[in-house]
Image (cartoon, helix red, strand yellow):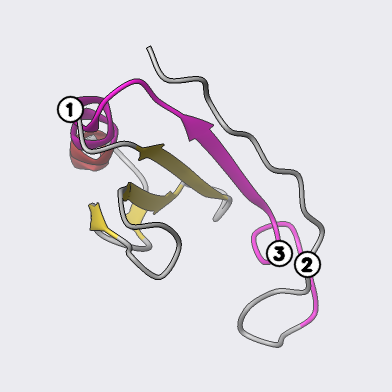
Amino acid sequence: MEAARFTFSVQVPIDGKPPTVGNGTHVAFAVEDRSIVNQFYAALRYSGSDDGALGLRPNYDANYYGAFVRDTDSYKIEAAIYSAK
């Protein structure tokens, strides 16, 4: 199994607006394979909203595959993997 790579960063909100409860907060989970990202994104049928459909994001890494959602409080949550599996 590939070792998970975790990063901690503090940034200003991407939209340039002041940080609030749902703006400027981002929680990410490193997962073991792309099927888990797919399952994570599919959970939107129960609640939350899309904030970046699942797929490759080569601007982050050639194998970066992730999905972004917002929970009911507007917190941004991501599931991602840096692997082709």
How many numbered marks have been drawn onto this rendered protein structure? 3
Which of 85 and 14 lies nearest the eye of the viewer? 85
Measured Cα–Cα span from mark 1 to mark 3: 27 Å
Q: Earlier in the sequence, mark 1 or mark 3?
A: 3
Q: Earlier in the sequence, mark 2 or mark 1?
A: 2
Mark 2 is on which residue type? Gln
Asked whether the residues under the numbered discs 2 and 3 touch, taking CB atoms below 8 Å apart as contact, a structural biologist would say yes
Work out which residue is located at the far top of the displayed protein and give it: 1
State the residue position of label 2.
11
Measured Cα–Cα span from mark 2 to mark 3: 7 Å
> Is residue 45 depicted above or below 22 in this figure?
above
Measured Cα–Cα span from mark 2 to mark 1: 29 Å
Q: In which quadrant of the rendered image does the C terminus lie?
A: top left
State the residue position of label 3.
24
Q: Residues within 10 Å of mark 1 (few under 14, many from 20)?
A: few
Mark 1 is on which residue type? Ser
> Is residue 15 depicted above or below 24 in this figure?
below
Mark 3 is on which residue type? Gly
Mark 2, secondary structure of its residue: loop
- Magenta span includes 27: yes
Query: x and y percent of residue 53 in the render?
Result: 24, 59
Foreground: disc 1 or disc 3: 1
State the residue position of label 1.
35
